[in-house]
Image (tube, grey):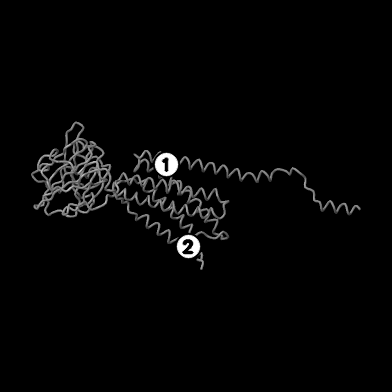
Amino acid sequence: MALSYSSNKLLLFSLFCFISIVGFNLKAVIAYSNTANPSATCNTNLRTILPPPYSDLSSLSCSHIWQQKFSFSFYQDGQNVTTIVLSGKNNHQWIGIGFSRNGSMVGSSAMVAWVEPNGVSGIRQYHLEGKNMSKVIPDKGDLKFTTARPVVVAHGDLLYIAFQLQFAASLAFQPILLAIGSANPYKNGSLPKHINSTTTFIEFSSGHHLTSHPMSPDDLRKYHGVTAVIGWGTVTPAGLLVARYFRHLEPSWYYIHSSVQFVGFFIGIVSISIGRTLYQKLGAVFVAHKFLGYTVFCLAGLEVCQFIGRPSSDSKRRQYWNFAHYWVGRIAMVLGLLNIFVGFHGVVAHDRLMRIGFGILFVALLTTMIFLEVRRRRENLIPETMIDQPPVFQVIDKSLTTGHRKSVS
């Protein structure tokens, strides 16, 4: 039995709700293969690099973490003393490792190490009372050190950070925060904002690294930008072009237009979901980009609702529906494209390749629209020109001529 018109509307509304829920709850998590080439290795002989007690750990547990670019080694004894050695590439930027109760940055304590270009190294504890630079307090925190002095050693192109902590109880399942700074700390101890961070989990009781690696902010920026460019900057405008310039393909144009817009809307929601995760990780305050993004989402959602509530062609409400549908769609497309440009000057400002790619797509889209608009206007002018011109030959009605001849005879 064929579905009724109201049943189709209910089905489409359910599909819209499903797409919205799935898109907004998309987990921006990706697991990295253990076969990746690590920047740091667990096979290094620490006795040739670090002083005691960090070089005398025969039972040291080691894992590759954070996209396999860091090695995390630790040992926990029976007196709740935990010795930690973190190694990663030395880029003359600060590297921080923090201990959190719930995986959140705020309220955690971190050890931050760095090496100056002249070879002078430093290590300092910080208490992360907030996400702003002024809330990251040097020489303060909940970490308690043993008599072993923390050390920082640059060996080749790797930086080794080693310290020993005393805890009230043995560590079990522990969230570990990792971050890389944009530059070394200032002379007053203030910490420049991090450019990349992640959270991982270590099972200290068994010596295993338990969790897959969540996306780094750089990865989030990349996927947020790519999905925004595809959804709001490519697919959705393409659907509008189909509706305006291919109406002569009845009734195919309508189904193509609707399908393309649904795809663009879903990809756009995925972009917003990744963007929300990115904002939470960075603690960013990019009001303009965020406001425009949610505005575009609301307008696009309104377009979907209008599609579901589309009146019949002979309805008196159809002309008002057409007016609202046309202008809401156009405004959403313009704001979506504008927000992509705004985003390139904020959360993905450093991604030059993505900016070039979107520039090429935008120029191609604009060129296609101009070409189709010019062709459409020319086609609309042809009938008027033909009507205005006088006939080349005079048309003679043969029936009238025959009748006239009969009457004469």
Say if mark 2 contacts mark 1, CB within 8 Å: no
Q: Position of residue 279 (x, y in %)?
A: 31, 48
Q: How many numbered marks have been drawn onto this rendered protein structure?
A: 2
Using the image, tell me which numbered label, if any, was put on residue 213: none
Residue with the mark numbered 1: 358
What secondary structure is marked by label 1? helix
- The residue type indicated by label 2 comes to Lys
At 21% from the left and 38% from the top, the residue drawn is: 158
Depth order, front residue of 150/207: 207
Q: Secondary structure at mark 2?
A: helix
Q: Is residue 145 left or right of residue 136?
A: left
> Which residue is nearer to you in this view: 196 or 161?
161
Q: List the single residue furthest toward the top.
A: 118
Mark 2 or 1, nearer chain start: 2
* Residue 159 image point, x, y percent: 19, 39
Mark in front: 2 vs 1: 1
| Kind of residue at disc 1 | Phe
The span from disc 2 to disc 1 (Cα, nearest Å) is 35 Å
Crowd band around label 2 with a 10 angstrom C-alpha radius: few (<14), some (14–19), many (20+): some
Q: Residues within 10 Å of mark 1 (few under 14, many from 20)?
A: many
**Depth check, front residue: 409 or 142:** 409
Q: Residue furthest bottom?
A: 1
Mark number displayed over residue 9: 2
The residue at the point 13 percent across, 54 percent down is 170
The image quadrant that residue 362 belongs to is top left
| Left or right of 80 on screen, residue 304 | right
Percent across and percent down for residue 124 are 16, 41
Q: Position of residue 256 (x, y in %)?
A: 50, 53
The residue at 52%/51% (across/down) is 243
